[in-house]
Image (cartoon, helix red, strand yellow):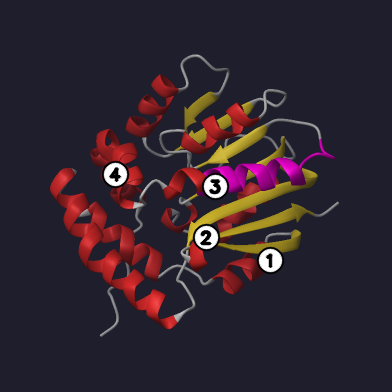
Amino acid sequence: MPSREVDKSPEKIRRMFGSIAPWYDFLNRLLSLRLDVSWRRRCTDRLLAAATTVDGPILDVCTGTADLALTLWKRQRERKVFGIDFSPEMIDIGKKKARNTDIELSVGDALNLPFADESFAAVCVAFGLRNVGDTDRGLAEMARVCKPGGVVAVLEFSMPTLPILSGLYRFYFRTVLPQIGQRLAKNRDDAYTYLPESVLQFDDPQHLARRMQNAGLVDIEIRSLTFGAVTLHTGRRSL
């Protein structure tokens, strides 16, 4: 029987992530075996390498507690880094973590980014696009605020292609992860049941690449990380 479609209503997403914010960083490290740190570094390195020909700041969409924004800032200091997220609680934690930096964090909607057209040399999102209610509009907004020739990067969970790994991955995501997450970060929205279902129902890498093309991005590259458990997409805003 197919899973019921996950609820991505703005009220649900804001409330759910607000309720797990205090546990968010700890559980990310625990449940990913700290692989999330290396995934963000890979995303950062690729993004910075691809954006060398365009001047301007970097925007991290769905920044959460600012992990990717901080990684971007630490790997380079020439470009200003901005981060935006739907959850005030997440942003509050991110601001504490980024206190001694010039990273600028704010609460905002990924479907209506509060920035002018062509403001950023690079725009990225890590593990957040699948939580946006309208994937196409979210990508279109990221492309809109990106400068011509600039880079858009999407780092997101995906399904391993090897059957044995895919089976283990599904078991871990649907059985182990929700039990650990929900016991530690008790919340009425079952956030750690939502997490695996939102991943399993999200686009496969090829479908997401087509969505990025439809948003006006070109030169799409797909990079599989950790045997396909995570995929990094990059595309360039057409000139």
The circle drawn on residue 135 is 2
Amino acid type for the residue under numbered disc 4 = Leu
Distance, label 1 to label 2, CA atoms, is: 11 Å
Residue behind mark 4: 27
Region of the chain picked out in magenta, as a range: 39-54
**Horizontal side, residue 39 vs residue 51: left or right:** left
User: Per the image, is 121 magenta?
Assistant: no
Amino acid type for the residue under numbered disc 1 = Asn
- The answer to which of 21 and 33 lies nearer the viewer is 33
Distance, label 2 to label 3, CA atoms, is: 12 Å
The circle drawn on residue 134 is none
Predominant secondary structure, magenta span: helix
Image marks 2 and 4: residues in contact by CB distance under 8 Å: no
User: Per the image, is 40 magenta?
Assistant: yes
The circle drawn on residue 214 is 1
Q: Mark 2 or 3, which is nearer the eye?
A: 3
Please, what secondary structure does the residue beneath circle 4 have?
helix
Residue 110 place in picture, x, y as percent: 51, 45
Residue 185 place in picture, x, y as percent: 19, 43
Residue shown at the point (30%, 38%) measured from the top left: 26
Q: Mark 1 or 3, which is nearer the eye?
A: 3
Q: Earlier in the sequence, mark 2 or mark 4?
A: 4
Distance, label 2 to label 4, CA atoms, is: 25 Å
Q: Earlier in the sequence, mark 1 or mark 2?
A: 2
Residue behind mark 3: 125
Amino acid type for the residue under numbered disc 2 = Thr
Q: Mark 2 or 4, which is nearer the eye?
A: 4
